[in-house]
Amino acid sequence: GAVVSQHPSRVICKSGTSVKIECRSLDFQATTMFWYRQFPKQSLMLMATSNEGSKATYEQGVEKDKFLINHASLTLSTLTVTSAHPEDSSFYICSARRDREAFFGQGTRLTVV
Amino acid sequence: GNSVTQMEGPVTLSEEAFLTINCTYTATGYPSLFWYVQYPGEGLQLLLKATKADDKGSNKGFEATYRKETTSFHLEKGSVQVSDSAVYFCALLRSNSNSGYALNFGKGTSLLVTP
């Protein structure tokens, strides 16, 4: 199957700093990628839809200025958590669409201290 | 709106036991349904899917049947192995075309199979 690579897998940062998470489709081009967030013992919740060459579409309740998404190429989308706070600590996972199937990255465990 | 409810874990079974993980959904129209599996330290992988009522998805000995009358998509396996230990997510494809191929997930069910 298709491969989606997400980096880093774990990151610890200080409050107030920004963290960038990358999502790459390694063997296919993805015009659409998705960013999810998962709280402990909760579902994966869609944060935003990332479209190559255009602005991301955010789900209701997700702060656009806090979670910056850039989809500058057909194989790369980035999520930047700006001015991170402890409540942003979570598991973030991306997926990329190919044909009618979604392929997921390994996820990023973000801890803000 | 669209939502998925799956049984809470963790589920602990002995090797070769029968597995059922319940999943029910609420949706407008007839969504496609999926089971994803997440092995420790890895991303989500599609396990199986069904796109219309009465379809049966199957893979690696796992099966799930799309039951419209009961709005269910329960995951089953006749004889689990230690290597099946993972977290299993039931999901449906949103009918909102604005979200492209975004999925609504259940909370996940952790399965531990012991030798």
Image (cartoon, coloured by chain):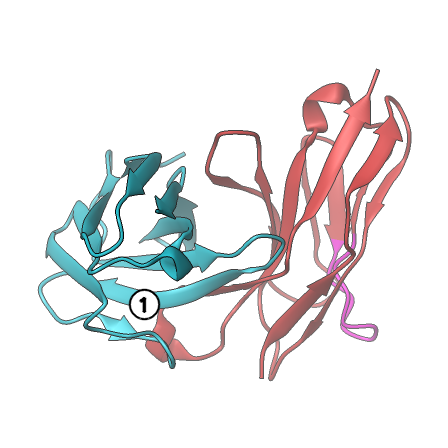
What percent of the width, then of the height, locates residue B114? 82, 21
Residue drawn at point x = 41 percent, y = 44 percent = A104
The relative height of residue B4 versus residue B26 in the rendered view (above or below) is above
Q: Which of the image's four quarters has the N terminus of chain B?
A: bottom right
A74 to the left or right of B16 = left
Residue drawn at point x = 63 percent, y = 79 percent = B27
Residue drawn at point x = 38 percent, y = 45 percent = A111
Label 1, residues with CA under 10 Å away: few <14, some 14-19, many ≥20: many
What percent of the width, then of the height, locates residue B84? 70, 28
What percent of the width, then of the height, locates residue A112? 34, 49
The magenta span reads B65-74
Q: Which of the image's four quarters has the C terminus of chain B?
A: top right
Circle 1: residue type: Ala
In this view of the protein, which residue sits in the foreground, A73 or A37?
A: A37
- Main SS of the magenta part reads loop
- Camera sees residue B14: yes
* Residue B43 drawn in magenta: no
**Chain letter for the residue marked with disc 1 in the picture:** A
* Residue B72 drawn in magenta: yes
Q: Which residue is mark 1?
A: A48
Chain depicted in red: B
